[in-house]
Amino acid sequence: MKDMLAERPSTRRFTWHCGFMRPSTALAALALLPGCAANMMHIDGSEEGKRYDRYSVNHHSVADFRVDQGELLDSFLTQSVAALTAEDLVSLNRVAQDGVRVRASAGAASFRRKKSLQDCLEEAEKQVESLRKELEEDPGSQSRRQQAARERAAKERKQRINKALAHLSDIESRKKAKDKDKTRTSTTDPEARVMKMADGGFRPAYNGQFAVDTETQVIVGVDVSNSGSDMDKMSPMVDQLLERYGTKPNDMLVDGGFAKHEAIEQVGAGDDGCTVYAPVPKPKDDDRDPHVPLADDSEVIAAWRVRMGTQEAKEIYKERAATVECVNAIARNRGLQRFLVRGMHKVRTVLLWFALAHNMMRSASLRLAAAQTT
């Protein structure tokens, strides 16, 4: 009975809400749920079966609790949208996708070239060794907590520099020979990349991706990339939706940044392919009609060109700005201005928190509206 109660949708929604509470309040509330105490993450290090009447948490344990549950949050997103689909509140008939570039937790000055990274690594190794010798020579010079904090900080810096060097090699492999010596990566967040932001400036950032059901503004897919371009992002999102819900949307609405011919062909191929609504780029020849198929166009690309020249397609495409761009703006207003975590895995977890919080409020509105019409 307790396990069944813990799996109820109301319990899951309550658990999501706890993610935004103060840590001590959230843990106490979760511990009171029947069947949840034995399964919840023991953030205080206590063993299963012990009482949850005391909590010993610090910044690191709270931060870990927030970002280490990516797979669980991802499954919550799938379950919540599937529940709305079962209630006929979400159809997944038409989905709009857009990217949102968010400032990373790294400064421009943290980006270094290979020689500078190697010097930093040597310095970090010396610092780790110095702390080890200091501890051996005088174990009582500092408290155990201070020693652990200093040692952890030194080791984490060394790990970040090693990771930066590894990412540097990957970036170099994709650059032209003349540009390889100019390659830089961040010692603070090696996975972050410098991107052009909405205001025209260039800053370390991540490119978050939201897929939204256009009828309800419910977020149905979440992804993240450290590439500033959206060109290769549509096909993976459609694959993600198929994996989550067992079906593809009938229509995919994306802006011109996604309109790569290969991506449109991949998404639109087959009997179960999606109908893509994306603007056709303006041709270099001003006399050529962009909506007339070219001789070397595939069947899917030719159909896309002709379709986007119709008034019906133009009206459908307007739904993109009114839905997914609106959701992105709402996320900005709720604090999605700069990530306070580092690494794509943690960044994606933060995006999932935003998606779940957004969907909780949309679910309440949709259910209320459905109840009023019956």
Image (cartoon, rainbow, N blue to C red):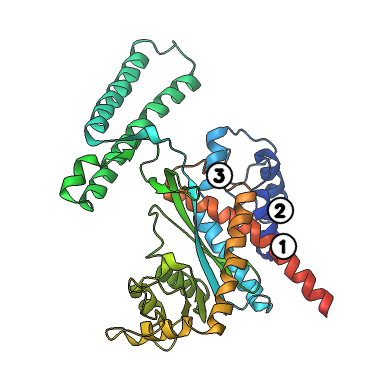
**On screen, 27 above or below 266?**
above
Q: Residue at x 67, y 35 (%)?
A: 54
Q: Residue at x 43, y 23 (%)?
A: 150
Question: Closer to the N terminus: mark 2 or mark 3?
Answer: 2
Nearest the viewer among 26 and 173 is: 173
The C terminus, quarter of image: bottom right
Could you tell me residue 71's position as x and y percent? 50, 57
Q: Residue at x 61, y 55 (%)?
A: 329
Label 1 environment density (alpha carbons within 10 Å; few <14, some 14–19, many ≥20): few
**On screen, 224 above or below 87?**
above
**On screen, 346 above or below 93?**
above
Q: CA distance from mark 2 to mark 3?
A: 18 Å
Q: Which mark is residue 10?
A: 1
Could you tell me residue 15's position as x and y percent? 66, 54
Determine which residue is flagged by label 2.
33
- In the displayed orientation, state which residue is furthest to the front: 287
**On screen, 87 above or below 55?**
below
Image position of 173 (left or right of 370): left
Quick one: SS at disc 2?
A: loop
Determine which residue is flagged by label 3.
65
Three-letter code, disc 1? Ser
Residue 211 visible in rendering: yes
Three-letter code, disc 3? Phe
Numbered disc in front, either 1 or 2: 1
Residue 2 visible in rendering: no
Could you tell me residue 365's position as x and y percent? 75, 66
